[in-house]
Amino acid sequence: MTSIEIDRRRALQGAAVVGATGAIGIAAAGRADAAAGAPHRSAPALLTATYPELRRGSSGAAVRDLQNKLAGAGYWLGGIDGSFGHLTQQAVWAIQKYWGLSRDGVVGPSTWAKVNLRQRPRSRYSGTRIEVDKAKQLMFVRDSVGMQMCINTSTGANKPFESGGRWYDGRTPSGTFKVFRYVPGWYSGSLGDLYRPMFFNGGIAVHGSTSIPPYNASHGCCRVSTAAQDKIIARGSLKIGATVNVY
């Protein structure tokens, strides 16, 4: 047998080994070679996805990716523009609240992990309604299809206050209510300015505000961003006669 025929037979035998053993067999052979002092051949490095820490003021492709995933899961944030602004911060607070994470507005490893689940949050009820979860400080906007918007909200701070010679407990009462009054534009009252308030329980309303922190801070109303209030009203979810569940 010539040397060429010998080399050809060895090559065919090697191909058969690969076919029979696959990658595991190759890996085992590699370990045996290393043990025998054979030259080391490093395996290709595994590609690991990394996600940068994002916060208000960040911008770029990573922010756009974040916005797409949040919006796709129902965390409303307005437009997708690659800029981490006020509405994106509201959405980040919302997903952090839903999953019980630290409400710091910073998208680090733990928040990215939940964002990457792309899982829509679940509310308590079905059907068309507004739901306010006081424990999570979240508002859910539902229609006949399902949960459409999950929004950061700020409800009553549970601190007594005085207004017009009367004392109030500063709470947002639980229960099922109907919207009975709407004031277009800004409404200026003794306790501050309310944007397009929809009153559902006495003087308590769902309204837009310029201050919606990630904790309960109101006199009893349910605050959302002015842009979110516009969106909820525009889609017909918040109107006279709409059901509001507070729990």
Image: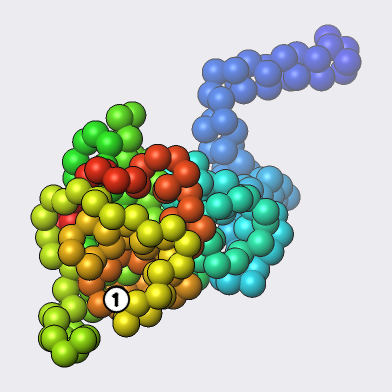
Give the residue displayed 68% in from the left and 45% down from the top.
44
| Left or right of 129 on screen, residue 247 | left
Q: Toward the viewer: 93 or 102?
A: 93
Quadrant the C terminus occupies: bottom left
Query: In the displayed structure, would residue 144 be above or below residue 139?
Result: above
| Residue 35 in view | no
Quadrant the N terminus occupies: top right
Query: In the displayed structure, would residue 127 be above or below residue 112?
Result: above
* Tally of numbered tags: 1
Give the residue displayed 11% in from the left and 55% down from the top.
175
| Residue 151 in view | yes
Q: Toward the viewer: 4 or 232?
A: 232
Residue 228 in percent (x, y) is at 46, 55
Residue 15 in percent (x, y) is at 68, 18
> Which residue carries the number 1 mark?
218
Task: Name which residue type carries label 1.
Answer: Ser
Give the residue displayed 57% in from the left and 31% down from the top.
23
Query: In the displayed structure, would residue 195 be above or below residue 132?
Result: below
| Left or right of 199 on screen, residue 32 | right
Residue 162 in percent (x, y) is at 19, 89
Residue 181 in percent (x, y) is at 28, 55
How is the model colour-coded? rainbow
Q: Quadrant of residue 237?
A: top left
- Label 1: element kind: loop
Give the residue displayed 53% in from the left and 62% down from the top.
87
Q: Toward the viewer: 11 or 208?
A: 208
Q: Toward the viewer: 189 or 139?
A: 189
Neighbours of disc 1 within 10 Å: few (<14), some (14-19), many (20+): many
Q: Quadrant of residue 166?
A: bottom left
